[in-house]
Image (tube, rainbow, N blue to C red):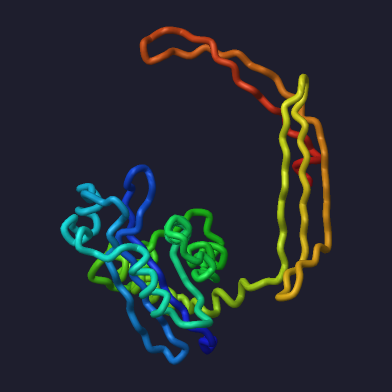
Amino acid sequence: MRVRKYTYIFLDIEAALIHGKQHIIEIGAIKLLPNGTRESFSKLIQPNKFKKLNSHIQKLTGIKTEELITAASFKEVMKKFMDWCSEDTIFVAFGEFDRKVLEEELIRNGLDVSFIYPMIDFQQKYMIANQLKEQPSLSSLLDAYQIEVETQHRALADAFSLCKIFNATDGVELIENQKTNKFGIILSEFRQMDNVFDLSISFISGNVSSKEIEITSVKNINKHLHYDIIEEQRKTEEGEIEIIQRTQIYPHNDVQLF
């Protein structure tokens, strides 16, 4: 087991869909210091132009409309959160949802997005380490490692659960083993022409350092893929027969090998 060099902050948010956008209604975090001590942060957040929380979120989280109406704004809470966070911090979340919603909220409120980096998706790291194809849930990992928790679907409780899973799986070792300075990028363009699809693919690989990005290899392939337009019949909900067209594209061996 490696000795921790960094401060890890395990982050979880609860969000609600309001006016077609995800808004954070609660943020919870556990700070794990290098010496093993823990600190916690938990705040409810009143979304902008908020009136009422839908019944599903209330039932799932136990958060009530009345609590959010009296809660502080996102900007107010985030200023306190930024002050609470340490320097040289690595944020850890479970899945991409928390990072994406937090980024959107920071941008929407004119706050510095870079403050939340680096952020590690522990779900992804765990999948790579254990060669999993399906995404494990937080609750399934709690069961797998026989970790007992009293509450779920509250931000602080889920952040604490993630911290426990991190310790049970030796998360420091898991993350360190996957560190690399190498990168690979795939760029593609797909255009339909009269009789074929024109496919261009580029694979760029290289190394990243604190001073520069070095490209070591660029591989390109351009091929025409033949296709057919196939007409099929299907029955509509009203029971009528309609004709639809389906495009069938034929694979190319060189593209598959590339």
For this orientation, the residue located farthest to the bottom is 35
Q: In the image, 173: left or right of 19?
A: right
| Residue 22 drawn at (x, y percent) | 38, 51
| Residue 61 drawn at (x, y percent) | 24, 59
| Residue 66 drawn at (x, y percent) | 16, 58
Q: Nearer the viewer, residue 32 or 89?
A: 89
- Relative to 196, residue 12 above or below: below
- Relative to 233, residue 115 above or below: below
| Residue 11 drawn at (x, y percent) | 40, 69
Q: In the image, 4: left or right of 16?
A: right
Give the tally of numbered discs.
0
The structure residue drawn at horizontal position 52% and vertical position 62%, both measured from the top left corner, is 124
- Relative to 204, residue 175 above or below: below
The structure residue drawn at horizontal position 49% and vertical position 76%, both measured from the top left corner, is 171
Q: Nearer the viewer, residue 234 or 33?
A: 33
Instruction: Give the image quarter of residue 28.
Output: bottom left
Q: In the image, 164: left or right of 113?
A: left
Camera sees residue 144 = no
Camera sees residue 5 = yes
The structure residue drawn at horizontal position 38% and vertical position 89%, both measured from the top left corner, is 37
For this orientation, the residue located farthest to the top is 240
Q: Nearer the viewer, residue 213 or 107?
A: 107
